[in-house]
Image (cartoon, grey):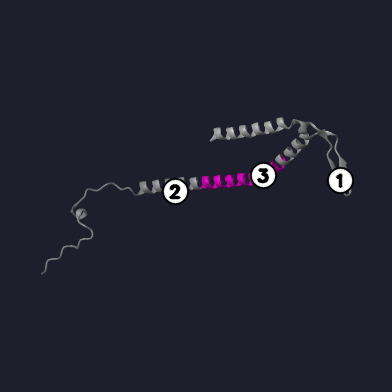
Amino acid sequence: MKKLKYVCWLLIVVLAAIVVFQNKGFFLVERSFKLNLYFFKYASPELPTAVYYLAVFLIGFFLCFFMSLSKKFKTRKTVRQLNEQLAAKDRRISELDSELAAAGKAQQAPAMPAGPKDTADPQAEPPAEPEK
């Protein structure tokens, strides 16, 4: 799967390089960016078009990065809480195991030899008493 991922990224980079190389005349033309809001006007210095495309790409990249930070922090917090719950449950399981082992040792009694009463079926009826 990793190799497929690298191949896809390599393909994207190669296609972007082809687009830029074939259109380098467009990307090297110097233009000025003009912003005219009713109450504010701005004109940038003459820069190659590629700089504007790069700036827009970087703005979008950082915007997406910072928008995803809150989700990343929430996920990290959830993972930490779940790990704490798991550790608490593991501690409880080990406590119960030790209690079970201690109870098993306490209930062990010396083994007594099986006598005639022990071999009888507990659900069988007791023998009838002789009549007088």
What's the magenta region?
A: 62-88
x, y percent for residue 63: 72, 43
x, y percent for residue 21: 71, 30
Q: Is residue 131 left or right of residue 70?
A: left
Q: Which residue is mark 1?
A: 36
The furthest residue to the bottom = 132
Amino acid beneath label 2: Leu
Q: Which label sits on residue 68?
A: 3
Q: Upstream in the sequence, badge 1 or badge 2?
A: 1
Q: Is residue 122 left or right of residue 41?
A: left
Q: Quadrant of the C terminus?
A: bottom left
* Badge 1 element: strand
Quarter residue 51 falls in: top right
Q: Upstream in the sequence, badge 2 or badge 3?
A: 3
Q: Upstream in the sequence, badge 1 or badge 3?
A: 1
Quarter residue 54 falls in: top right
How much space separates mark 1 and mark 3, taking CA atoms?
Answer: 32 Å
Location of residue 100 with respect to 19 vertically, above or below: below
Q: Which label sits on residue 96?
A: 2
